[in-house]
Image: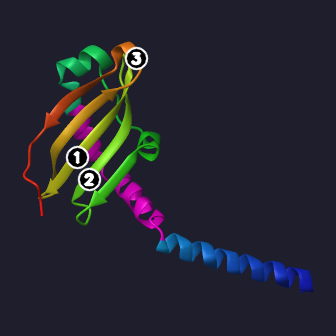
Amino acid sequence: MNRNKKILLGSTVAALGVIIIWFLASDLNKVTGDLVQAYADPELYEQAIALANKNTEAQTYLGTLAPIGNMAILEGETRYSNEHQKVTTTVRVKGTKGNARLDIKAARVNDVWQYRLIRLRIKSPPEKKRTILIREEAHPVEK
């Protein structure tokens, strides 16, 4: 093995080592874990969409909402806490009449999602801009 190849191999291994250490020490590890968990919890989104599709205001402005696609989860934002028993997430949704953002706050109790907030936010067109509250439960501040 010639000298240039040895230097290139050594540099590559060192760079990969630095990247791996940076990844493990940063929040990217948690973000990646949250995304993986979001893909593993399709019922979280399915139940929220089903509830939204029963709302007359949502039907008026958005029509029937389609199931959440994998890209919508990737493009959105998801944060789990309390050992993946609580979640706050925002994903895009597509309806037969328009598009919106779906905000969800939920807690898993006995393997069932209990929704504390389900909200649709329509941003465009500007004349249709509005927030549609599907479900909101008041809870005391948790310690």
Specify the quadrant that holds the N terminus: bottom right
Write the residue at 28% across / 30% down. Answer: 120
Rendered image: mark on residue 1? none
Q: Is residue 119 magenta?
A: no
Question: Which stretch appears magenta?
Answer: 26-50
Q: Residues within 10 Å of mark 1 (few under 14, many from 20)?
A: many
Query: For mark 2, what is the residue?
Result: 87
Determine the secondary structure under disc 1.
Answer: strand
- Marks 2 and 1 close (CB-CB < 8 Å): yes
Task: Report the amino acid beneath label 1.
Answer: Lys
Q: Marks 2/1: CA distance?
A: 6 Å
Rendered image: mark on residue 126? 3
Q: How many marks?
A: 3
Q: Residues within 10 Å of mark 3 (few under 14, many from 20)?
A: few
Q: On the picture, is 44 further left or further right than 38?
A: left
Query: For mark 1, what is the residue?
Result: 105
